[in-house]
Image (spheres, rainbow, N blue to C red):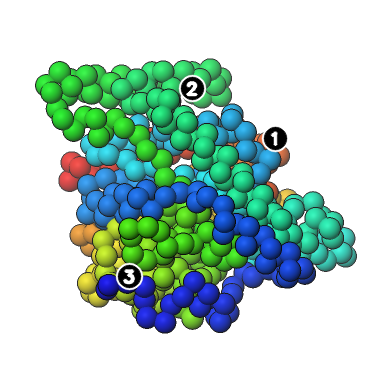
Amino acid sequence: MTTLVPPGWSIDSFRDKPIAQDVHYEDAAALAEVTRELRTLPPLVTSWEVEKLRELLAEAEVGKRFVLQGGDCAETTSETRASFIVNKLKILLQMSLVLIHAGHKPVLRIARMAGQYAKPRSSPTETRDGVTLPSYFGDLVNRPEFTAEARRADPALLLRGYQHAALTLNFVRTLAVGGFADLHHPEVWDLSFFERADLPTELREQYQRTTDQLSEALRFMEALGESTVEQLTRVEFYTSHEGLNLHYESAKTHEVPRRKGWYDLTTHLPWIGERTRALTGAHVEFFRGVRNPIGIKLGPKVTPDEVVQLVRALNPWGEKGKIVLITRMGAARVAETLPKIVEAVGAAGLRVLWITDPMHGNTQTTASGIKTRDFDDILQEIETSFEVHERLGTVLGGVHFELTGEDVTECIGGGLNVADLDKKYVSLCDPRLNYRQALEMAFRIARRMKDSRRK
């Protein structure tokens, strides 16, 4: 364990493995030039931030804190604007406030932000009116317009994605330093909440009560001289994205001074998707060699043995806070499939953080061909996941959402029905919870957390 590099691994060893979801770049010289430039540019995150996150995830593994991970299905560079960034952070803050109050534990916020520009697709091509072109793989790869030029994989977009990620992170850090997220004064950063006419009175009042009660509790703790109150009220944001494009990820993976091993400095928490988690594939090969904590998306077809092998491959030294298993089974299948996986991981003596992603297993298509998700299905998968872990004596340590702080109409339930979907459906990929749905979901999870505490 002297080098913290697994046997046989190098920064380029993934290139000898099959790359799932790979895209074809016509101009190899241009790709090489862009990746060379990326290697010379400053990192987006730091190794000490990565190490701090691993410490916090280790606490979440044993139930000492709860993880709220959320953000866009696929970020677009056109939304690198102050209002969009603020609204994303605000909904995560407001949801976390509700969860802190209910769970009586700190909430770790991890945003799908500043890098979620690449998106896996079920098919490499798309056909419209008899014309077949490459699918849109996100702003890191190509463009959404249905033209041959737009759908061409463009290496310059790797650099553009880096630049927009840097701009986003710079603004997020500026907000944090400026006190935007100080929980001592939640009444300050929630003012715009009350301007939203679409929120029902009951939800507004419930949120106001939560804000008042938490503020009063913090003041009481400070009056007693409680030293840990500073830790509770200091809000930190970490970033995450699917490590899909290995040209991008490898270009920003470096050794750093005074630390052993290699760090992927595009994000704090990269994850491997359901379509790229093959044990013999390039993504597992690449990420088994980085020091970051690694998320692994697990769908209903994964076998218990596969999960055990994945965890061992990606965490060869059995470190705490290293592996985040993000289960996405679907409301109809979670009760059947999740227990077998949880039991296998426990029997193998592996320490992981369990998180539920109730979005991806519950996608449906309407009669008119619109992709959507049902609020009740999402909630059911969360509640069933809580039940499974409680029954087996393990900890459900967090939730993973595709959501937005905007008033979109992409998921049904929580005040929307199928007829509402075409009012403001703006996602280029998957449907997201809107502002009201996300906040209401937080209160429903909070209710479940309170029940768990009583038990």
Badge 3 element: loop
Q: Marks 1 and 2, Cα distance to the nearest angstrom?
A: 21 Å
Q: Is residue 159 visible?
A: yes
**Can you give x and y, in whole percent of width and height, for residue 34 in the image?**
67, 60
Query: For the image shown, how many numbered marks are present on the structure?
Result: 3
Residue placed at 30% from the left, 58% from the top? 321
- Few, some or many residues within 10 Å of mark 3 (<14, 14–19, 20+): some
Q: Does label 3 or label 2 sit earlier along the sequence?
A: 3
The numbered disc on residue 193 is 2
**Can you give x and y, in whole percent of width and height, for residue 141 in the image?**
68, 58
Residue placed at 47% from the left, 55% from the top? 265
Give the label, 1 or 2, closer to the camera. 2
Q: From the viewer's perspective, is 126 left or right of 129?
A: left
**Can you give x and y, in whole percent of width and height, for residue 208 in the image?**
37, 20
Callouts 1 and 2 close, C-beta under 8 Å: no
Tag 3 residue: 4
Which residue ends up furthest to the left in the rendered image? 224
Tag 1 residue: 423
